[in-house]
Amino acid sequence: EIVLTQSPDFQSVTPGEKVTITCRASLSIGSSLHWYQQKPDQSPKLLIKYASQSISGVPSRFSGSGSGTDFTLTINSLETEDAAAYYCHQSVGFPHTFGQGTKLEIK
Amino acid sequence: QVQLVQSGAEVKKPGASVKISCEASGYTFTSYYMHWVRQAPGQGLEWMGIIDPSSGSTTYAQKIQHRVTMTRDTSTSTVSMELSSLRSEDTAVYYCARDSAPVTSDYYYGMGVWGQGTTVTVSS
């Protein structure tokens, strides 16, 4: 099973800041890494697919990068509505797995 | 619009089974893979398995493979997930989620459409 480890687990940030969340895979997964946002009491929402491909309707301040074992989700100029948990997900093999999540709190 | 609507909340006793349905609309049901994902209270996301609605072929997470069955009904565009021998650790919100990849793809593109979630509570 491929283990995804996110960092940090929690971050308190100020609106306007740039935020970086990392996801490290226990094996190389190419670019088969996707990012989700989950707000309280809501279903997750796909933000980025295949490490860096944007999703229609997702604000351009969200971007992704990386390949192999190290991946990054970047949020430029954080907005208050970005308070949420963020998860990475690998789909290169079964079982698919998720990172443990990163909770963003807005100061 | 593309939509997944799940069945309602369930309360079950330990040892019982639960079956959750997920009705798809707004797209060709047999064209896209469907995942099931669960989330225990205050915890992260856990992948449970995937079904190819065109063939009915499934792959399950090893942790639950002996207790889970995923099926599809093409006449009603519905996928279902049944979990048996329930235990307290199965208390969670269960989601169906459509992959962005068509079933003709060898790859998976991320879960682009999610159901609203179904809460399952296992308690004596």
Image (cartoon, coloured by chain):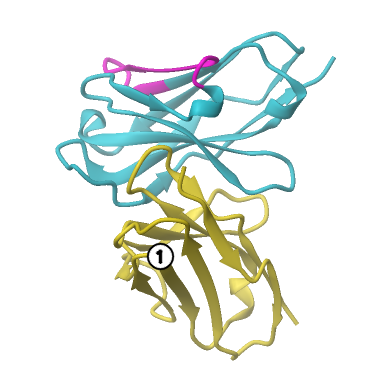
Chain colours: A yellow, B cyan
- The residue under the point 55% across, 27% down is B63
Q: Residues within 10 Å of mark 1 (few under 14, many from 20)?
A: some
Q: Nearer the viewer, residue B97 or B86?
A: B86
Secondary structure found at label 1: loop
- The residue under the point 53% across, 88% down is A77
Which picture quadrant has residue B75? top left
Toward the left, the furthest residue is B104
Residue range in magenta is: B65-79
Q: Is residue A29 left or right of residue A44?
A: left
The image position of residue B89, as x and y in percent, is 73, 28
- Using the image, determine if residue A65 lies above or below residue B101: below
- The residue under the point 48% across, 30% down is B61
- Looking at the picture, which amino acid does disc 1 mark? Thr
- The residue under the point 43% across, 70% down is A71
Q: Chain of mark 1?
A: A
Res B2 visible: no
Residue highlighted by disc 1? A69
Q: Is residue B76 magenta?
A: yes
Q: Is residue B123 magenta?
A: no
The image position of residue A60, as x and y in percent, is 38, 79
Q: Is residue B74 left or right of residue A84?
A: left
Q: Nearer the viewer, residue B124 or A42?
A: B124
